[in-house]
Amino acid sequence: MAKYTLVVLSNASADKDAEFNEWYNKVHIPDVLNVPGFVAAQRFKIADAQMDKSNRPHRYLALYELETDDIQGSIKELQKRAGTAEMVISDAIDIKGVATGMFSPIATRVTANEVRR
């Protein structure tokens, strides 16, 4: 079965960080993980320490893992559910500023222990 990672960069609407995080963790992630093909998710908040402190338009990152031989079907189903009772979209998310990308691996995962000199 093919594996993919959906990368989602987002922000909360003005002054709605707490509501955004509550909705994302307790409502949105379960809704997305009920879409066929989606198997796991993890969220991140941008850290204070950065290699480059220039333009940082997004404060939040979500990574969704998919395992499917029909990635187009999973994408279509996700889009079909968005904004319905199966996938409620909160006004606490700045929906206009969301950036997404679907990625597929091109190499195996490598750990530091495997290449330590």
Image (cartoon, rainbow, N blue to C red):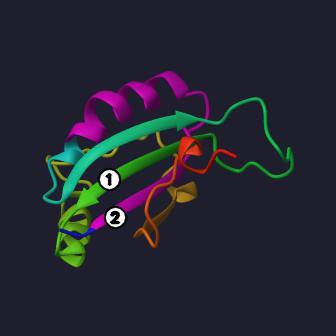
* Residue 67 rendering spot, x and y as whole percentages: 22, 61
- Outermost residue on the front side: it is 117
Find residue 81 and report its image quarter.
Answer: bottom left
- Residue at image location 29% in from the left, 40% down from the top: 29
Please give the label number shown on residue 4: 2
- The answer to whether residue 18 is magenta is yes
Confirm whether the magenta stretch covers residue 104: no
The N terminus: image quadrant: bottom left
Among the two numbered marks 1 and 2 on one chain, the one whose residue lies closer to the N terminus: 2
- Residue 58 visible, this angle: yes
Q: Residue at x 64, y 47 (%)?
A: 58
- Residue 90 can be seen, yes or no: no
**Residue type highlighted by circle 1:** Glu
- Tell me: residue 115, above or below residue 25: below
The residue tagged 1 is: 65
In this rendering, the answer to whether 55 lies above or below 1 is above
Look at label 2 and name its amino acid: Tyr
Q: Secondary structure at mark 1?
A: strand
Judge by depth and name the residue closer to the eye, 104 or 20. Answer: 104
Question: Percent from the top left, x then y, of residue 2?
Answer: 24, 70
Where is residue 71, by image quadrant?
bottom left
- For label 2, the crowd category at 10 Å Cα-Cα, with few meaning under 14, some 14 to 19 and many 20 or more, is some
Q: Which mark is residue 42?
A: none
Q: Residues within 10 Å of mark 1 (few under 14, many from 20)?
A: many
Name the spot of residue 32 as percent of width and height, x first: 24, 48
Callout 2: helix, strand or loop? strand
Q: Which residues are magenta?
A: 3-30
| Residue 57 position in % (x across, y down) | 70, 50
- Left or right, residue 85 beside residue 24: left
Q: Which of the 4 quarters of the picture holds residue 72?
A: bottom left
Asked if the residue at tag 2 contacts the one at tag 1, i.e. Cβ–Cβ closer than 8 Å, the answer is: yes
- Residue toward you, 74 or 69: 69
